[in-house]
Amino acid sequence: MQAVATFLCGGVLCTALLISLLFTRLWPLVMIYAVWYIYDRDTPHSGGRRLQAMRNSKLWTYFRDFFPLKLVKTCDLDPNKNYLFACHPHGVLCVSHFGNFATEDTGFSKLFPGIDPHLFVLDGHFQFPLYRDYIMGYGIVMIYYSCICGCNKNSLEYILKSKGQGNAACIAVGGALEALEAHPTHFTLNLAYKKGFIKNAIRTGAFIVPVFSFGENEVYTQVRNPVGSRVRRLQMFLTTYLGFSPPLFHGRGVFNYTFGLLPYRRPITTVVGEPLEVKQNSDPSNEEINELHIKYVLALQNLFEANKKEFGVSEFHHLKFI
């Protein structure tokens, strides 16, 4: 309840709290924070402000056990290198990506010792006062996403070049459009033309790691929105002007199992694949980007096909790229 309410309403509630305090004797505190907010505005671009106590909070063990969440590694990662974790699918609320990479509830640091994960989210989350400081405590940092050109290189390059070795930038590369495809038993990924993360990996020399969460699309039910329908056209219009997609979804309630905003209790297993070696080039050509993109898509397909049966996916289901 806390996790979902914070994600959906935290920013608005924090802003409303500060506005209400302006009309009380505590208004000087709001003004002091406003000065701090302006001074600190670039911190989300430069690694955030992680508080390990928040990542290790007992609260997230209950979050993990609710579904439950599980993180599986297929090989060790060298802590003397940097990595770009390309996470799929986006899902409605990125439940598994938050649980795995913004908290320690699934044991990331034990599975990958020496690797420091940084979960990237949309810029809009950091526009809300107080809320921005809360989510930065989990090591969450800022990314700019668009439907075409991918991610902001400044945020990524700080993590993958300026912070030294042993860092992992974790990105749900499918973005807003992939969230609209998050239907149970569907495996449609917005990846066919997503090459911004490939370009940034080459620029920084970070190895690309395919990550797939089996069950991410099962925890919410979304209203049918096939391409060309009125619902999808409205969603695409709002996505264009708001910068994020508005999926129409529901899960279970607090005291019922049929309708509400809580996710369904269905297991999610995230499999971290083998890294693709990347040769650093500060100015990659289109040929280099396309070649690595093809290799990445093939590696992701192989990861999915090798693990799908073990985690309850029919042999007749395959990844679809749009």
Image (cartoon, grey):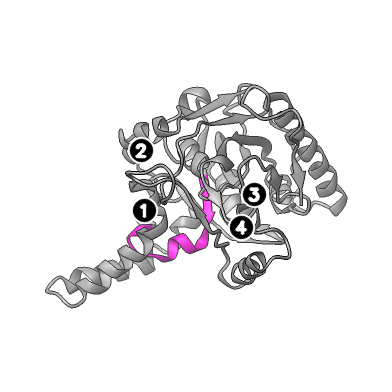
Residue 104 can be seen, yes or no: no
Residue at 53 percent of width and 28 percent of height: 71
Seen from the viewer's position, the closer of residues 149 and 69 is: 69
Dot 4 or dot 2, earlier in sequence: 2
Which mark lies nearer to you, 1 or 2? 1
SS category of the residue bearing label 3: loop
Q: Which residues are magenta?
A: 119-131
What element does badge 2 sit on?
helix
Question: Which disc number belongs to residue 52?
Answer: 2
Residue at image point 32% right, 44% down:
255
The residue indicated by pointer 4 is 176
Within-10-Å neighbours for mark 2: few <14, some 14–19, many 20+: few
Q: Earlier in the sequence, mark 1 or mark 2?
A: 1
Real-space Cα distance between discs 3 and 2? 26 Å
Q: Earlier in the sequence, mark 3 or mark 1?
A: 1
State the image coordinates of residue 117 (x, y, percent, origin top left): 51, 38
Q: Residue at x 65, y 67 (%)?
A: 236
Please state the total of marks drawn on the protein image. 4
User: Tag 2: residue type?
Assistant: Gln
Magenta-colored stretch includes residue 130: yes
Tags 4 and 1 touching, CB below 8 Å: no
Name the residue at the bottom extreme.
Answer: 23
What's the CA distance linking mark 3 and mark 4? Answer: 9 Å
Quarter where residue 16 is shown: bottom left
Distance from disc 4 to disc 1, alpha carbons, whole Å, reads 19 Å
Front position in the image: 151 or 203:
151
Residue 235 in the image: above or below residue 183: below
Q: In this orientation, does residue 160 appear? A: yes
Can you identify the residue that label 3 sits on?
173
